[in-house]
Amino acid sequence: MALPIAERWFETRRIDDDITLLWEPHVVPLMRCNIWHVRGRDRDLLVDTGMGVASLREAAKHLLEKRVTAVATHTHMDHVGGHHEFDDCLVHEIEAENLRQPRGMGRLVTSDWDPADVIALEGVGYAVPPELVTALPHAGYRLDDYRLRPAHPTVLVKEGDVVDIGNRHFEVLHLPGYSPGSIGLWEEATGTLFSGDALYDGPLQDELPTSNIGDYLVTMARLREMPVSVVHAGHDPSFGRERLVELCDAYTRRREARAA
Ligand SMILES: [Zn+2]
């Protein structure tokens, strides 16, 4: 069946004066990541960049008034597909090589994926559809031609580093478990946490080839104690401190029950 042509690829919603959410409505829910634009005095951040099916730089040009750093909360295809469009790319040092040379998944047709990835996702309750998009970005687009494109990491970070955009400062939290180089960006002054896929309000995946359950339990214990006012995650709606505690506790209970 032929897919329809999308009228536009990205949707945009302003969250507050400085933060805008972008997303790709024609990407299947499993792979539809939250792209966060954060406006700073000296530079902007784009926290993750989506699949790279269409140009994020073009779609977000009304927001991009100054230099922008494309942050990779981790290097899965649904989060770093647009990084190649940006000169400044920030990633945890452990996953820098994945940004340079993408591995795993990386295709829009899931029969081209590593079966281990499909099994891991189905195991936590996701349906993995044959194709990851429900529309085409333009006429003549061929799903088979999609590749996750390499990007050039220019800023390698680790736990405790500070991302300074002039008027706002984000501390890098190393949050391994989901993937070894998962990071969060934490702004203490406002209680804002960009959590990537370390924590979102949906089925968490910890059996991917890149996951580590022991690390994930440590990350959850750490996140549970954070005095957040809002968590802007890699998927699904944002949430506050009460929901953060529920999500961390639910994960920990589920894993400890299985280990017992
Ligand atoms: Zn994700």
Image (cartoon, grey):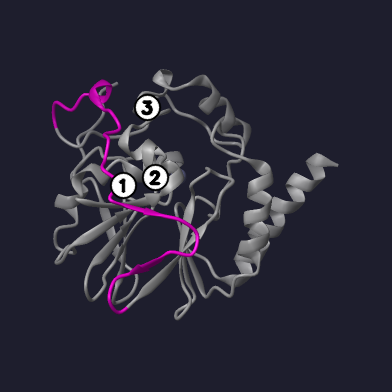
Q: CA distance from mark 3 to mark 2?
A: 13 Å
- Counting from the top left corner in percent of width and height, residue 145 is at 23, 23
Camera-nearest residue between 225 and 169: 169
**x 64%, y 47%: residue:** 215
Position of residue 177 relative to residue 248, above or below, is: above
Disc with the residue nearer the chain's start (2 vs 1): 1
Which residue is under mark 1?
A: 24
Labelled disc at residue 131: 3
Which residue is under mark 2?
A: 32
Q: Is residue 92 left or right of residue 54?
A: right
Residue 221 quadrant: bottom right
Residue 81 quadrant: top left
**x 49%, y 71%: residue:** 230
**x 29%, y 77%: residue:** 17
- Label 3 sits on a secondary structure element that is loop
- Determine the quadrant in which ligand 1 lies: top left
Disc with the residue nearer the chain's start (3 vs 2): 2
Badges 2 and 1: C-beta atoms under 8 Å apart?
yes
Task: Specify whether residue 53 is in view.
Answer: yes
